[in-house]
Structures are given as structure tokens and as C-alpha cells.
Amino acid sequence: MRKNIFYIIIIFCLNQELICQNKDHDISIVSLDSLLNIKINSASKHWQKTDEAPSTVSIITSDDIEKFGYRTLDEALNSLAGFYTSYDRNYSYVGVRGFSRPTDYNDRILLLINEHPINENIFGSSPTGSDLGLPMESIERIEVIRGPGSALYGTGAMFAVINIVTKTGKSFNKTTIKAGLGNLGRYSGNVNYGTDTQSGADIFVTAEYFKQYGNNLYYKQFDTDSTNHGIVSNLDKEEYYDVLASLNYDNFSLQAKYSNRIKYIPTAPFSVIFNDPRTKTVDGYNFIDANYTIPFSETHKILLRTSLDNYLYKGVWPYVEYLQQEESNGLWWTFSLQDSWSMSSSNMLISGIEFKKDLNAEYKIFDSSSTYFEMNKLNSVFSFFLQDELQILKNLSLNCSFRFDDYSNMKGYLSPRAALIYNILPVTTLKFIVGSSLRAPSPYELYFQDPLNNFLQNPNLSPERILTGEFVVEQRFSKKIYSTFSLYSYNVHDLIDQKLNTADSSLQYQNFSKVHAFGVDADINYSSQEGIRAYLRYSYQLAMDPSSEEVLSNSPAHLLKAGLILPLNKTFNCATEIIYETDRICVDGSATNSFVLANLAISTNKLFDRIKIHLKINNLFNTAYSYPGGYEHLQPSIMQDRRTYFLTAELEF
């Protein structure tokens, strides 16, 4: 580890020397002022700067994505304070502030694309890896709203709301073709088109294709003569393609998305046949969304929105005696109305209603001769929300909001949030935030049963609840340096987990767990006129089961992250990131090792006014590290990829 850190210091010093030799070149500069003045709409459902938002907000810009070479959403989120990731070679998972239950499918964060919710209606999952089906090249920015968000968004917004804002025809205004090639047998293609027509129509279209063949992998838990001595041959394969299109005209907006992803699974989960090439999952997240704004005046408008979503899933699990399959087909319709009214210069009132109805929520398990389980439980929810933002003094504001969700299959629940925002100095903002959020149990958790394995359904589950308190200091030290410090505590009640009944050895989802946590996030950012950008982020997080006083599994106590973007000359840019995390407890009580990862990205500005080239190297020093697996794995931890690289070339028209 000391050798790796020594190499990292050398890289940073060499890059600093190069930039000092090239101070006067012409580059695209992302200033600190421009970053802090970006307005977001996802924190309060109206446009505001991040220091005005009733939460701790992080923004990952398109320039961050390009310079650091992020290829998936979870890779970008992993750069933030308080966020960490897992990957079991099937799905990616995102932990926030010490909380990430094994194989929870990210059902306790709410994911949006242009404010359209993505979480599906059968498992409640949100895709954060390649299953998202959205090219990173199409993203304008990622807005990350920490803390409880159910007061505006309802179920699932327990730990964070993440809004992906895609590019528009006006902001993009060109056509690009991009091709990539890397080790692990990876290659990709991507096309983006954007235009702002004379008639006023704004059109943006993006499409992507990716394929990976993968390497052979070794798992010592399967090291026997009958299981190929633990070696998986060519089974870490993946293939996906996706399309997203948007149209904006006057006060009307329309967006549509289609994706399909196939992932072959090398870890033999659920006790399937080891090294069987049939083991795979297939996922698709698809939607069409339309909204129309009615402007009554400059201070009063109504937003009408309707959408139709479809989620498709298939799992193939080979056993000795049969080939088991599972399929899901979710279809749901949503309508919402939001009224935004600036009643005065010091009072903004936002209210709205939302109705979401399942049209299909089918899930079944079967083989060629039998159907073991089948359900299609249709639910609906009617919601009302209200938010009042009051400017008490010139430098003091109060944001209060609540949402009531009335479910067809359970009683209604109220989710409140309040934030006091005090600009104690022009460069210093204090925030005091308290709120409660919920996650309604998914149809799978409510109704799944498996007589063969003695798994019982539990239609009487209650929603999970979280109560969060947070104190935030946002400080601008100079025109180049900005920092955020957050101290938080939360309590989760009625956490839904699988519970074993020792009397009859049955399993069932029950509300029996609790979590208490507190922690600190510290984030300091530097941005200069020469184009140098840097960040340093530290998180301490302690999440415990209060009944046993044991630390939660899959919860690292310390996270330390650093990143640096350096323009080397008129042509080349260099970006480096370092991530350190301490051990995580696995589901069997063992623990992963602490590790340091270093990533390196080298990119060009436009060559011949048309071409960009980008090289991304992950795990630069070939570190061996692993993440905890879920209950479905024989392996307590899943070894991650060693050094990988990916080279892309982009042609612009």
C-alpha cells in the first residue's frame, strides 16, 4: 500500500509541474462561480441554487463525467462524500451514509431522469449500473439530494433523491459518434444528436450499444474436481443497448426511453450449477413521459404531467434436475398536477396531487413442467403534497413540506420535512434539517411465497420509516475554495428483513429490524481560472442495530476520496481519483479488507475541431479488493476487477 501511495504522489506532482509550464493555454474552464450558481429543481420542485435548497446537495457536471471518464452512474456517485458502491457481478448497489442492505436493489433511494421516477413497481428497485440504460455522454448533470425526500416524492426517497438531467438539443446542438474498446473483451458504440430548430422545437436523441466478454474468474468456495476447480470460463459476459429521446417545444416536453440489458452471472448464486453458461438476468426500464406547463402569470403556474412505465425482468437459474426461470412484467400509469405560486417576494407555495396506478405487476417462477409461484397484485396510491418556503428575514428562510400517501393496499402515511436556512454571512450558510421518509413494502415483499423452501407471504407488512436530523455548514473560503460540512443522525423503524422462524424453519419478510446511525461528511472543492479542479472528501459513518449494538453489514466506517483535474496543455487533460475505504462486515460475519483504489483518465480537447480521444484506467495499481455479497451467494465477498482500461474516440459533426 505504501508503494501505491508513493506512486500516486509522484503522479500528482508530475501533473502539477506540467500545468505550471502551461498556464496560458486556452481551455474550457468550469469556474467555482458557475458550479455554485447552477440552479436545480429537484430539491424543492422549483428552481434554486444549492445553498438555498433544504438539504445537502451535490452536483456532478457533464465536465466531471467527461474528464474523470465515468462510465456508469454508480461510478460517478462513488466519488461523493457519504456514498459507496457494491457489485456482485450481476447488479450494482449504492450505499448512503452507512446504509446498504445485502441485495436491496437500491430500493431506499429514489432515482429520477429529468424528474421522472425510475423505481419499478414489483421490487421497488432503481438501476445504478449498466442496467440503467442511459449513456453517460447524454447527461448534463446529476443532482444528488441527500436525506429524506418523501415529503415531496413519496415512497423510496429515504436516504437520497438522485435526479439525472439529460442534455437538450439547444445545449448539445451537434451530432457525435463515439466508439470504445477495452480489456475484458469490451467494446461500445454511442450516437448523440441534438438540435434547436427554427420553429422552436428542441430535439435530443442518444443511443448506445455495449458488449463485454469478460475474463475467467476463480472462486475458492467451488474449488473441487467436479466444479472445474473453482474456475468460471467466459461467464462474466454482458450486453446492452438503449435509446433515449426528448422533445421540448414552448411549454410542452416529451421524453421516452427504452433499454435492454443481458448479464451472465459467474458467481453461481442461489445454489445454481457452477460454471453453467445459462445463468443470466435480463432487465429493461422503459417509459414515455409528457408534461405541459400552464403559465397564469410570472408568479403562478401549473404543471401537468403524465407517464407510462414498463419494467421487464427475466432470470434463468439452472439446477441439476430442472431449469428454473423467473419473469416480471410491470406496467404503471402516473398523473400529477403541481401548482407553483409565488404569493409574494418572500413566500413561495407549491402544492400538488399525484395518482399512480398499476396496470400490471406480474411475477412468476416456473420451469418447463411447473409454475411454482405466480402473482399479479395491482395497487394504486393517491398523494397530496404541500410545501411553503417563507423568507423570514433577508438572510433567513424556512422551508416546510409534507406529503400524504394513501395506498389501496394499506393505510395512508404522512411524510413531513422542515429546514431552516440561515445565510449568516454572504459566504456562509447554515442549514438545520429534520424530516421523515418512508418506503412502502414492494409487492414482492408482501406476497411472495415458496412452499418448497417454506417461505411465507406477509400481506400485513408496514412501510419502513426513517427520521433524520442534520446540521450543515456551507462555506466559501475564497473565489477558488468551497466546502460543505454535514453532521447527521437517523433512526430507521420497521425495517423489512427476512426473518427465520426457528419453530418451523420458515422464512418471511417482517418489520422487525431497527437501525440507529450518526456520521459526518466533509467536502472541500477547489477550482481555479487555469482550469485546475480538485476535491477532498471524508466520511465517518456508524450505522448499528440498537438491539444488538452491532455494526451493520456492508457499512464501511471511513471513506476518504480525492480527485484532481489538470489541463496539461492545449490538447491534453489529466484526471486522477483516489478512493480509500475501511473494511465492511459480510453477511456471514467475516469482513472485507480495507483498500486504496487509484483511477487515471487522460483526455484530449478537440483535435482538428472534430475528434476527442479518452483513455480511462480503473484500479491503476492493480489492487486486489472485494465487496460483500448477498445471502444468495456462497462467497461471503465478491472479488472485483483488477486493472482495467477503456479507450474511446469521438467524432463530431
Image: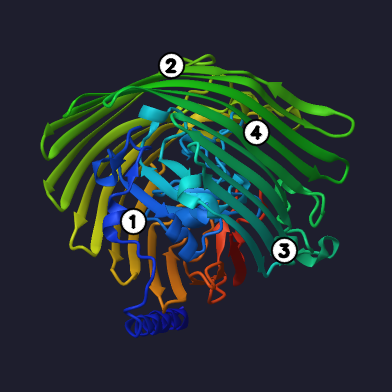
Q: Point out residue 32 in the picture as x, y percentages from the top left corner.
A: 28, 59
Q: Which residue is mark 4?
A: 311
Q: CA distance from mark 1 to mark 4?
A: 36 Å
Q: Secondary structure at mark 3?
A: loop
* Picture quadrant where residue 348 is located: top left
Task: State which mark lies toward you, 4 or 3.
Answer: 4
What residue do we see at 16% from left, 32% from top? 391
Q: Which of the two marks, 3 or 1, is nearer to us in this view?
A: 3
Q: Which residue is tagged 1? A: 540
Comparing marks 4 and 2, which lies closer to the viewer? 4
Which mark sits nearer the N-terminus, 3 or 2? 3
Q: Could you say whether the residue bearing mark 1 is in a helix, strand or loop?
A: strand
Q: Earlier in the sequence, mark 4 or mark 2?
A: 4
Disc 1 marks a residue whose amino acid type is Tyr
Tag of residue 214: 3
Image depth: mark 3 or mark 2 in front: 3
Query: Which residue is located at x 44 percent, y 42 percent?
Result: 162
Q: Are marks 4 and 2 in contact (CB under 8 Å)?
A: no
| Circle nearer the N terminus (4, 3) | 3
- Spot the residue most to the front: 198
Q: Looking at the picture, does residue 572 appear above or below residue 145?
A: below
Q: Report the residue at 52% width, 69% height from top.
A: 609
Kindly identify the amino acid type of the residue bearing the numbered disc 3: Gly
Nearer-N-terminus badge (1/2)? 2
Could you say which is closer to the camera, residue 175 or residue 82?
Answer: 175
- Looking at the picture, the colour scheme in use is rainbow
